Image: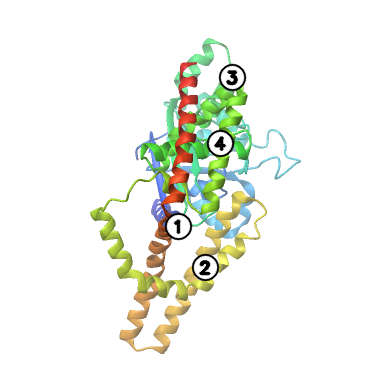
Amino acid sequence: MRRAVRWSLRWFFGRIVAIYFREIEVVGEVPEADVRGRMFAANHVNGLIDPILLLTSAPCAVSPIAKAPLWDVPVLRFLLDAMDAVPIVRRRDDPAKDAAANDAVFARVGSHLGRGGNVLIFPEGTSHNASRLAPLRSGAGRMLARSRSGGGEGLTFQAVGLEFDARDVFRSRVLLVYGEVRSLDRLAARVAAHRGDLAVAVTRQLAIDLAGLVVEGDTWDERVLVARVAEMFANQSGDRSFAGWNAIGQRVETANAVLKRADSRLRDDLARSVRDYYAELDRTGLGDADVSAGPTRPKPLRAVRAAFLIAVAPLALFGAVVYFLPYQVPRLVAGTAKERDVVSTYKLGAGLLVYPAWASLLVAAAWALLPVADALGWTAALVAAPFAALAWMDRAETIQRRVRRVFAGPPSLERLRARRRDVMERLETAREQIEAV
């Protein structure tokens, strides 16, 4: 029974995040369904959204390690217990906590891993808004070391990077990058040869692996700069996927660090050129993808998509009108969030309450006031309308940009393209210099 409840919850929340995010890309060494005895360690930047994404994307069953105060929320308590989550008390939640207070938790997690279970942990210790990874806590390493000393065999650990193109925006994109699988026994052998500490070695390896999966910057301005340069190279290559951007972003981040040390003047000059180019894009309302795009060529799939959008347009309009009020509620609730990393959590939580309640109210009214045939039609329309509206919402930005391109006119586009070519030539020259070094 417990397994059925757990599977049902994973399926349900998998559908929910698929609605909340327009696109969820999963790349890297994705685990198989039969993986056992593995610890997954991820960066933490988007509140409760992060564990939901990881628990629903992993083909194998995973038990999360979560902060103890979450068990004080009745609904969350049920969900956490159903997922076999493990509570851990952080010092920030209980300043008087004894240093040995988590020994029982470490023992429980170690035993779970030793029996072949999998766990998910966020080693930064908290969700945050920083442009870089926070220093990792040692808990993950200590749990693995405890499990191995208790007889656990064949244990592994794996870093997972989470990237959001706009983490607090409904229908944005998210990327999950599964890193290299690490053998605890192999690492322990190397540590023993140097008489080191296994928990410290695990923590250090996780820090290296996580840093290699996400794009960072010393400041948010620098992180935005790296992201924009990566976007330009990705558009130049024709790869518009989030995974492609992430891979290029890793190389741009490394190049940025090299330039800061080797030629800070050149780096600052390149940064100024990129910022000026994007400032001009902002003034025209266009994006780099619009400027880098060549002439639009007819594509059969595009024609089919356009026909579908036209066909569902009346239903989408109906959904936009009928669901206008509940659509505002999550936005208002999210406005009360004090930190950006919990905005999506607030939106998702509010939406899970408001939309079903509103739809149920409308369906009940239809069945109370209309004949059976009409009530069936209204019920079908009320269920389908939000999804038709989502299809139009996903295409709205693309349509708006194409309209802007038309109104911008050839002279403006040519000026921006000339500006872009100049920036790209300078970036390519800098890249050649870095590769030579």
Q: Looking at the image, is mark 3 or mark 2 earlier in the sequence?
A: 3
Q: Looking at the image, is mark 2 or mark 1 earlier in the sequence?
A: 2
> What residue appears at the point 33 percent right and 85 percent down from the top-left corner?
374
> What residue appears at the point 29 percent right and 64 percent down from the top-left corner?
308
Q: Which residue position holds label 2?
A: 327
Q: Looking at the image, is mark 4 or mark 3 earlier in the sequence?
A: 3
Query: Mark 2–mark 1 contact, CB under 8 Å?
Result: no
Seen from the viewer's position, the closer of residues 16 and 217 is 217
Q: Does residue 109 appear in the picture of this structure? A: yes
Q: Residue furthest left?
A: 300
- Residue 32 placement (x, y as % from top left): 34, 37
Q: Looking at the image, is mark 3 or mark 1 earlier in the sequence?
A: 3
Report the side of 413 relative to 140 (left or right): left
Q: Which residue position holds label 3?
A: 262
Spatial CA span between label 2 and label 1: 27 Å
Q: Amino acid at mark 4?
A: Ser
- Helix, strand or loop status at disc 3: helix
- Residue 260 placement (x, y as % from top left): 60, 25
Q: Which residue position holds label 4?
A: 273
Instruction: Give the label, 4 or 3, closer to the camera.
Output: 4
Spatial CA span between label 4 and label 3: 19 Å
Query: Mark 4–mark 3 contact, CB under 8 Å?
Result: no
Seen from the viewer's position, the closer of residues 412 and 49 is 412
Q: Which residue position holds label 1?
A: 404
Spatial CA span between label 4 and label 1: 23 Å
Q: How many marks?
A: 4
